[in-house]
Image (spheres, rainbow, N blue to C red):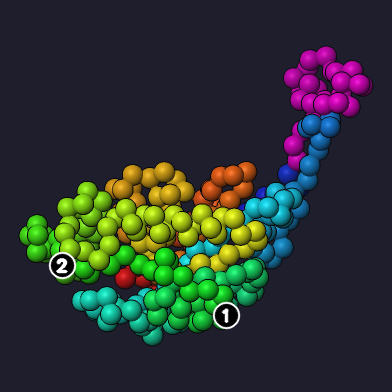
Amino acid sequence: MVNHANDFQSLTIPTPARIFAASGQVPVSDRQHQAAGNIFRRRTFPRAAQGANVPPIHEQQGNSDVAEIILVRHGQANAQATDEASYDRLSDLGRQQADWLGVHMRTTNPHFDRVLTGTLSRQADTARGMGYEITTQDPRLNELSYFSLAHALEDQHGIPAPRDATEFATHLPQVIDHWTRNRLEGVPERFDAFTDRITAALDEACHMPGRTLIVTSGGVIGMALRHTLGLENGGMAKIMLQIMNSSVHRLEYVHDMLMLGAFNATPHLDSPDRAHARTFV
């Protein structure tokens, strides 16, 4: 990764006087220059501290009535599972991913005002593996029931479950498409109910000032980004396919708007010797 910190060490924004001087136009009067200088005052951007993380959004905005929400997908779970129960446990690599992410956070920006997870084991174990004490386990942050949806899709529409990652990339959008159009019967949860619980939990977090860490799952994060960015359901499915295990996503609630600050970051896995740990399933 190229370090551009030095690029901003002495970056300046020219004042109106410099602009006029460069263009050869008649300079403004002293009074006009002084007034314009209040708006276009020279600024110097200091070099970022080594290893510094982005400051909390309330420090950037100078306003304590805003919120920063850090979403983390759980570490790798049991990739060989064929049902929800057997999937819900971290693999050895998943535990290692959580530990690496926790170390990274503790050396950059470790403080959170609260830590939330769903009630699933892989979510809670990831948060604890990162070294954080869980404030609240909220079932609204639980993952969608993928295996149940996949079985319904096969039984009712003849679309078989995927056998590998390539087939999964095609299969997941099909699952989401049928689910959003209420074409799957007998499933544990309707798409509208899934939408409502995720957006309700997210909206509550937006009104909790400070920094909130939410350790959850890929489908929940996909829905959070759908809600934030106004995505269509097909766009949400594509987002879900890209969400890596132990990845970090930052949302910022400011000026009564929820905005995306970062997506799918894995700084704890950037070194070449950790390439094997960059997993999706």
Left or right? Give the position of 158 relative to 261.
left
Q: Which mark is residue 3?
A: none
Residue lying at 81% horizontally and 35% vertically, measured from the top left: 41
For the stretch drawn in magenta, the main secondary structure is helix
Residue lying at 33% horizontally and 79% vertically, measured from the top left: 88
**x then y, percent, for residue 72:** 48, 67
Image quadrant containing the C terminus: bottom left
- Residue most toward the top? 26
Which image quadrant is residue 24 in?
top right
Mark sitting earlier along the chain (1/2) = 1
Q: Which mark is residue 151?
A: 2
Q: Amino acid at mark 1?
A: Glu
Q: Which residues lie in the magenta part?
A: 12-36
Q: Is residue 73 visible?
A: no
Residue lying at 63% horizontally and 69% vertically, measured from the top left: 112
- Circle 1 residue: 133
**x then y, percent, for residue 271:** 49, 71
Left or right? Give the position of 152 relative to 193.
left
Q: Is residue 160 visible?
A: yes
Q: In the picture shown, does residue 234 fall above or below 198?
A: above
